[in-house]
Amino acid sequence: MELLRWGMDLDLRITRKTVQQEVVDKLRQAILSGTFAPGHRLVEADLCEALGVSRSSLREALRGLQAEHLIEIIPNRGPHIPVLTWEDAEEIYEVRELLEGEAALRCAARMSDDDIAELAERLETFHRAARDENADDLADAAAAFYELILSRCGNKIIQQMLAGLLARISYLRKRSMSLPGRALKSHEEMRAIHQAIADRNTRDARKAAMKHVSNARASAKQTFPV
Amino acid sequence: MELLRWGMDLDLRITRKTVQQEVVDKLRQAILSGTFAPGHRLVEADLCEALGVSRSSLREALRGLQAEHLIEIIPNRGPHIPVLTWEDAEEIYEVRELLEGEAALRCAARMSDDDIAELAERLETFHRAARDENADDLADAAAAFYELILSRCGNKIIQQMLAGLLARISYLRKRSMSLPGRALKSHEEMRAIHQAIADRNTRDARKAAMKHVSNARASAKQTFPV
DNA sequence: ATAGGTATTATTGTCTGTCAATCTGATTGA
DNA sequence: TCAATCAGATTGACAGACAATAATACCTAT
């Protein structure tokens, strides 16, 4: 009886999101999936109608997304999808290299055997997507691979920061992953990361992860007009 | 004539903050200065009255602060100042060590001679505060020292991330800085950082910065009840 | 025709007020 | 003492209003 009530409460806690939270999630997903092009203006009235929420709820959600750097809000001009310059992107890749290297190192030191097996599976999923050359599947598979590393690195701050950085360059990653040969090259690099983690070799894990990000940055740079 | 109009526009752009932004700034300052104790509940109605703004503006500001992790908002219970567990704080110190090491390394590679002189001045200011043993002056002087390193590291992402992390542990830093001997020890470590940067020794700069954070973590740990 | 200024419209920033849902704390009853 | 219940406080969400600002269309004079 007690347990049942607890279970219900727990269920509700998890399920019952506030409207504001749902709006944040929906918009975040829309932004990450590329529904809005960089530079696209987000008009409050339109979003309210599309989402079926009031302006107050929407505006609160927008403030949250602004803090995540997923949108920019200019006073009196409203929110829009930020347009990354290559300089901005490069700084993100630099920090990502640092943090992702650290995350991989930590995974090599502390990941469970089950997690390593799961990582191998996700790697294989990515490999299949790479051969099929489906851009969306590729992005999803890569995200799943990273997600496991982030969530098992043993430091929530690193996890959150990296997740935020990955989000901000998601469309860059999608774009550069479509460069000829990049997907398979990427798979090789990810395989090296998995191998080092499986070998419990912290130094190699960091090195492999950093190399991977470094190559990803080079690919992304190619997709930028001069 | 044209210039005059430009000047006015520029002035307005900088000066005219939105109400929401002002509220964020005011509340952030209040939180960082320790006006609210950890765990303190922030009641919307009270804040509205104290700040003289409407609930809409206030709530938008709160969402921003939530995203900065300066407050937590629990659905239907409202916002409160987060209570850091030592585990949370430790993870922050771990990342801070990584990022601050990198920032110092970059400063050693790229800081101008003028900046290095300025860094020496701020170090001396900190030294004076350390001898006077004024907790608030100490915190301000330390913040000024870090601020210069962050702003000159050449990567805005690192700068923002570190600023956010420092904010989240500001009251820990204030507390641990008051431990007997810690301020002077801290000064020694900061002097080492400055020296390595002045010598353009990137490796030493990183090592000194990491050591500094590592010691700060140990001091902070002492201030936690078992 | 066009540069420069003006009117119009669209959109945002902010406030007020309302109401239901939920939490908190006190009261009650067993 | 403990659990159930109730009342007050607080939040979540909405609608509507209006001024300030930005964006656009429209002039007008040269």
Image (tube, coloured by chain):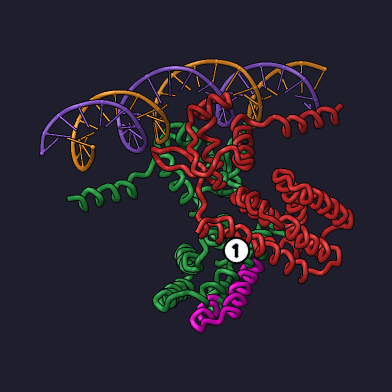
Chain colours: A red, B green, C orange, D purple
Q: Is residue B7 left or right of residue D9?
A: left
The location of residue D11, given as percent across then percent down, is 57, 31
Prevalent SS, magenta region = helix
Q: Is residue A91 left or right of residue C16?
A: right
The location of residue A186, given as percent across then percent down, is 73, 58
Q: Is residue A71 left or right of residue A33?
A: left
| Nearer to me, B42 or B109 | B109
Residue A26 sits inside the magenta stretch: no
**Can the viewer see residue A191?**
yes
| Nearer to me, B226 or A75 | A75
> SS class of the residue under badge 1?
helix
| Nearer to me, B79 or A26 | A26
Question: Which quarter of the image is occupied by the N terminus of chain A?
Answer: top right
> Where does the magenta region start and end?
B190-219
Residue B210 sits inside the magenta stretch: yes
**Can the viewer see residue B171?**
no
Residue holding disc 1: A94
Q: Is residue B104 above or below residue B91?
A: below
Q: How many marks?
A: 1
Identity, as a three-letter code, of the amino acid under mark 1: Glu
Among all residues in the image, which is located at the extreme bottom?
B199
| Nearer to me, A87 or A103 | A87
The location of residue B1, given as percent across then percent down, is 17, 50
| Residue that appears at 64% across and 54% down | A176
Label 1 crowd bin: few (<14), some (14–19), many (20+), radius 10 Å: some
Q: Is residue B49 above or below residue A82?
A: above
| Residue that appears at 55% across and 67% down | B177
Q: Chain letter for mark 1, please.
A: A
| Residue that appears at 33% across and 44% down | B16
Q: Is residue B39 above or below residue B135?
A: above
Asked where in the image residue A51 lies, by quadrant, the reply is: top right
